[in-house]
Amino acid sequence: MATVYLATDQRLDREVAVKVIHPHLANNPGFQEKFVLEAKTAARLSHPNLVNVFDQGTDGQTTYLVMEYVSGITLRDALSEYGPLPAVRALEMLAQILSGLSAAHSAGILHRDLKPENVLLADDGRVKLGDFGLARAITEHTSGSDLVGTIAYLSPELVTRGLADARSDVYAAGILLFELLTGKQPFEGEQAVQIAYQHANSTVPAPSNLAPATPPAVDKLVAWATSKLPSDRPNDAGEMLGKVNLLITDLKSGKGDKTSVMDFEINKTELTSTANATEIIRHGETQAILSPNSEVEYIFDSSSTQVLQPLSVKSQGLDVTLGQHRVGLKLLVASFLVVILGSGLGWWFGSGPGALAAIPNLTSRTVTAAEGQLSLLEPHITLVNENSLTVSQGLVIRTEPAAGSYIAKGTDLKLFVSLGPKMVSAPNLLNLNVAEATAKLLSAGFKLGAVNSWFDIHPIGQIYDYLGADGTPIPEGTSIDLNVSLGSIPVVSGIDQAIAVTAIEATGLKISSIQEEFSDTVTPGKAIGLVPQTKPLGSGGSVKLLVSKGPNVVIMPKVIGETVLAAKALLEGVGLTVIVNTDQIQSNWGIVKVKRSSEAAGAKLKAGDSVTVSTK
């Protein structure tokens, strides 16, 4: 419904995004109302993970929305280019999205169109949720006369009943998490109705089916968020966010594969005597379960359900007696090694040579600026030149490894630098019709631009001019405008004025004026021709109609024997120009008579012709 432009706020000297409603919708009250609603809805929200709205207004026929400009890419772009994410990174991404969505829910607003295209990844690492064009205030059940939102993310209740609340956004967030983990949407089909049917009648599969490394707890989180019944889901984005944050902590601690806030179940049959156990220490195939007061411990073999024997533990101490298995000594040694190795690995991966850092997005940066941003990584940089349609010459197009990848210090890295667009010749489109030219343009890697129709000497429907028609190379992929002939300007010469006017207006041309002129060939009252008033002349253009006054003929009167003054008046009266050849002063012209003239009496002349009379 709109076009978004990058603009400069001249008053505050900052870049902003200006969303302008399309002209063909500007006069539609329904679209206008929807556009203004988006502005008011988004303006009620202020959160680091939401795109801020600065202003909204109308300038003449232009209705616009001024928003925060987020330099970066969409989550859809990232998924397309880099593929799915590991579980922890997917959850961290989701947490930022849910944080912004939670703010909307707290303000009583549904998003209703949560999808990767509406999640913006800023160059500085921020994640922003935008495009509240389908947002509505939350009532007990928000409904609409039609389904809104992208079909791949619609909840079952929206598909079947058209009803939505905060749990519908939660469902979409669950689908989004599935896509972050697997790189695919859970339901696919050739038609939208097939996908909608699956949402209404099928259960979202576990992400681990496609991404085996997905922890079971994350599978459960997706299942919880995408439950078919809204009552079985988190109540809103805030509740889901709390669970996601706890799960992230659990996974980072190394317990997420077996225990987590979503999946913390200890077999009560195996550990009847340790119902209050709070910590599991693993070593090989033997596990030790500590009681809350750290005074009594039971050990069991993970390959069986048999509890081996009790052991005594001094509170907070390391003096542990484990009987015949001597597990205490093994645990003590293992703990010591963990501390020593952990310290060394902490240095190695923290500030040492193994330190990892993400490659920033360097697109459209100068090489010098890019090298500056990469200085902490100390990479071995190789410059590679290639053509680009979107990045200006001399600026960075991309990196390899790609932006967002984690690399260690000293890693080899390629900077791809733009040579600008590749210059190529446009194909020959002259005398083709639009369909033929379009096929030829697309096959040559160009795009079809505007198609303009003008009156021309070429046959109607044929292309007679376009960008690159003279053979000058143009950027590869350029949009090429075509000039198509409407045929020759209508011929009206010799037609009665009234008939000529009707014929001209039938072609879509407008008559700006009608002017009479002499014509030796056209009968008085008939059209002489048209004079274009706009160039080039297209349908709806203006022309001037010339109408004949008849021949411009003057009969030379008899002037010999007339006084100079009388002859001069007689000749000028019929439209001729008089030249007097005399040696008499002008005061005698009323007395002295004409003896000779340059034209004989009765000669056919044109108005304006010169005639010389002589008194000598």
Image (spheres, rainbow, N blue to C red):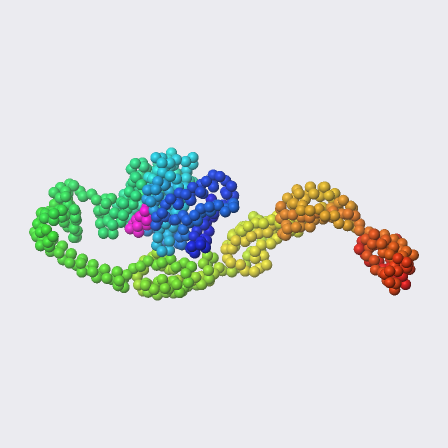
The quarter of the rendered structure image containing the C terminus is: bottom right
Q: In the drawing, does residue 512 fall left or right of residue 276?
A: right
Question: Which residue occupies the foreground of this view, 351 or 512?
Answer: 512
Q: In the drawing, does residue 5 fall left or right of residue 267?
A: right
Residue at 27 percent across and 64 percent down: it is 353
Horizontal and vertical percent for residue 222?
Answer: 30, 43
Residue extending furthest toward the top: 161
- The number of numbered badges drawn on the structure is 0
Residue at 45 percent across and 55 percent down: it is 10
Residue extending furthest toward the front: 587
User: In the image, is residue 592 above or below residue 486?
Assistant: below
- Magenta stretch encompasses residue 380: no
Q: Quadrant of residue 102?
A: top left
Horizontal and vertical percent for residue 276?
Answer: 14, 43
Question: Which residue occupies the foreground of this view, 612 or 221?
Answer: 612
User: In the image, is residue 396 above or below residue 30?
Assistant: below
Horizontal and vertical percent for residue 188?
Answer: 38, 42
Region in magenta = 87-99
